[in-house]
Amino acid sequence: MSFKNLEVWQLAQMLSVKVHDMTLALPGIEKYETGQQIRRSIKSVRSNIVEGYGRRHYKMEFIRFLTYALASNDETLDHLSVLYETKSLKDEAEYIKLNHDLELLGRKLNAFIKAVEKGHNDSSAVHEAPVDYSKTEDRSDTTLDLTSKIQNPVSSIQNLPQWQTLSSEQQYDNRWITVTEYQVINPAGKPGIYGKVHYKNKAIGIVPLDQHGNTWLVGQHRYTLDEWSWEIPEGGGALDTDPLVSAQRELREETGLTAAKWTSLVRTHLSNSVSDEEGFIFLAEELTPGDNQLEDTEADLRVWHLPFTEALDMVLTGKITDSLSIMGILRVARLKGL
């Protein structure tokens, strides 16, 4: 048997060609910086598989080089992420496919290493009949393929045990929230308590985008976090008001902008383990400037007009942590092919 019969080598060989071809289309200096690093690391995966197989009569040597291959595969995944995060690799579909195949190769290498650990003959005599590791790989693949047999559980949801409410007592109430404590029976049939925060407004977020690809962020000190937060324009909308109407009002109040074109982006539940707060996010385009109308609680609010790609970078680097902002900005980025 040759190393070329190993499925892990076949997958590594295919990926080395795909990664090489991908790097040839990288812009300028990246072709020779991260591009060169990712070409080296993926080729290291296949060469370590080959060298390990050449030492297969010695168990620890075999495992050592397969482990090197696995580490090089992880390095390749990281280089791929860098290229995508820096927008040097702009083709999202190509990134997703390469990332999927590299993760698959990593799982197969892990399974292969475990198979060698379990099935290797410890004798180092070269004249002994070799272990057929291609068959060992097939056994590990059975585990990997089990996901294809998982059934959609939606049809069985109706039969699952549910929470039961025995009693409730309001603990706190103000203009914005109500906190209630419930005596309950949990799905395991045991008694307990559950605290729920009811929100008296919907959470509304807007991503404004002008014809030049710029957006607007608003920044303010968030009392609950005791820190400054950059966010998309946001606010509360009455439960009985159309979220779009609330979004139009909120955009005008915080930025002075009005929009002729509106697109619904996201409906979300922001913390469904403890609250019933529902959020809605919109994309606002074809903008007209005007004067903002801030509330007293927004006296420290600052408005920032910046390229949308810069706001996207702030999300990807963790500088924006607000959940509505992250969802809205990533959704717009996907819609615009960024």
Image (tube, helix red, strand yellow):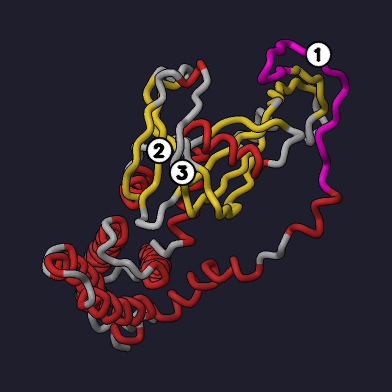
Above/below status of 299 relative to 207: above
Amino acid type assigned to the residue bearing label 2 in the image: Leu
Instruction: Please tell me how crowded label 1 is: few (under 14), some (14-19), or many (20+) other residues with Cα within 10 Å.
Output: few
* Circle 3/circle 1 CB separation < 8 Å: no
Magenta span covers which residues?
160-179
Quadrant assignment, res 129: bottom left
Residue at numbered disc 3: 326
The residue positioned 80% from the left and 27% from the top of the image is: 190
Please tell me the numbered disc located at residue 217. 2
Tag 1: amino acid: Glu
Residue 254, position as x, y percentages in the image: 48, 32
Q: Nearer the viewer, mark 2 or mark 1?
A: 2
Tell me how far mark 3 sits from mark 2, CA to CA: 12 Å
Q: Is 175 in the magenta? A: yes
**Relative to residue 240, is residue 125 depicted above or below?**
below
Q: Position of residue 258 (x, y in %)?
A: 52, 44
Percent from the top left, x then y, of residue 206? 52, 43
Q: In percent of the image, x 31 and y 77: which residue is there? A: 15
Instruction: Check the image and report above or below for 226 versus 124.
Output: above
227 or 189: which is nearer to us? 227
Q: Which mark is residue 169?
A: 1
Q: Earlier in the sequence, mark 2 or mark 1?
A: 1
- In-image side of 237 versus 336 (left or right): right
Q: Nearer the viewer, residue 129 or 43?
A: 43
The Cα–Cα distance between marks 3 and 1, rounded to whole angstroms, is 35 Å
Q: Nearer the viewer, residue 306 or 181?
A: 306
